[in-house]
Image (tube, rainbow, N blue to C red):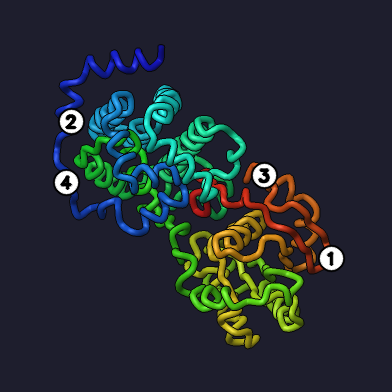
Amino acid sequence: MQLRIYLHAYIGCLFHCTVMLCASPVYSQEQPPPDQPTNNILVRKNFPLLWHFQQNRRLGRLIEKDTILAFIAAGKHEDLTRALNCADAPECYAKAVLFKESEQNAFADEIVRLYNGRKAFRKLAVKLRADGSYALYENLPDTAMLRRAGADVFAGLNRMIEVYLLGTRPRYDKIDSISFSSGDTTFYRQVHNALEVIQEKKTRSFFEIPLRSALSVMDINGRNEAARYEPMASGDNSLPFKKLPGTDWGAYKYSLILVPGLGPETPGVRLDSGAISRLKDGAIRFRQGAAPFIVVSGGNVHPFKTPYNEAVEMKKYLVSELKIPNEAIFIEPHARHTTTNLRNTNRIIYNFAIPADKPVLIVTDTSQTNYISGNMDKTAIRDLQYIPYTTIKKLNDKETEYYPVRTSLHGDPSDPLDP
């Protein structure tokens, strides 16, 4: 019934929609084209489903030609055109680009029909299962997994707009919030200019206006942390990555030594003294032969919008001051919380083919050790929807060991600075 309603509405505006969808793309100097490398990375990490839609031409064409999804795309163009002439700027902009519940429901129904009728969508489900993008849903049937993946996309895009355009409180407002004050006319003008470029593009894909809008707002806020230091196997990680194939894993009890970061609260400070203490203890365990590699984990976190990355600064200290070989240290430069220190380290394990049947040794301070073995389970369930380990054991006041889980590959677009 719902599909018929959407189809009837679509036919009613067919001529208008066709005119809107046939214009050629236009870019201005106000906002770079949304296919820049940073945006590709952000889409891949936050919205794997949309990334496949963009990268696979056959999927893209099927989506553009689909009657229901094309109707949603046309409606988004109409909404955005009206919003650009609205006096109450931020609220109008957000209302135009946020996904409505009816649009989400229509997609959920349509993705099932496309899956049942088109081989390309069945192949997509296989790819998503293989790469673990939606590992949390891997026990569901394909159609249910695709519907849940779509729900994640809508929730994630809407969350980006709500936080980084409307100023809604993020999960941790001290470090993740909007960069502009309420009523900042310069900010609204930048958003208006970006949305004008998006509106002129006249894309046929149902998701492009919300996606491009969300990415533009994130860019204006300077919140591209999730794309920094990617791809993870290059840059500071290139030497340890090249060393992996020759590693004799049987010679070590642990696969990795994880040293979580500790962000300084004082602006201009590169490395907190507490992090230095953790590094010294981690270096001792490395020299004792506990594991062949150290992972230093932490993003650009404290203080708000710091230019210094915890993992990068920690690696510098390990190499220059503690004389640990560069090729023995992986940086994990994205984690913003203890739960994601573990989750992101697990991603290194699975993505780099490090043995997952060996435990990881966490070396940190007494306070964090107690938290890891105490209340972290509750935080992980609340924020990640799962616990990023199967077995965890406190060894002493500064050390914990755990086994990773593949569910850690599942993305979290509700936390777009480290999904």
Residue 385 in the image: state x and y as whole percent.
64, 42
Name the outermost residue toward the right: 396
Residue at 36% from the left image edge and 54% from the top image edge: 39
Residue 411 in the image: state x and y as whole percent.
53, 48
Residue at 53% from the left image edge and 42% from the top image edge: 169
* Mark closest to the chain's N terminus, 4 or 3: 4
**Gap between marks 4 and 3 measured at Cα:** 43 Å
Circle nearer the viewer, 1 or 4? 1
**Gap between marks 1 and 2 measured at Cα:** 64 Å
| Residue highlighted by disc 3 | 386
* Mark closest to the chain's N terminus, 1 or 2: 2
| Residue highlighted by disc 1 | 395
Residue at 77% from the left image edge and 56% from the top image edge: 371
Packing grade of label 2 (10 A; few <14, some 14-19, many >=20) is many
| Residue highlighted by disc 2 | 20
| Residue highlighted by disc 4 | 26
Circle nearer the viewer, 4 or 3? 3
Q: Tell me the element at label 1.
A: strand
**Gap between marks 3 and 2 measured at Cα:** 43 Å
Report the side of 118 relative to 244 (left or right).
Answer: left
Quadrant the N terminus occupies: top left
Q: Tell me the element at label 4.
A: loop
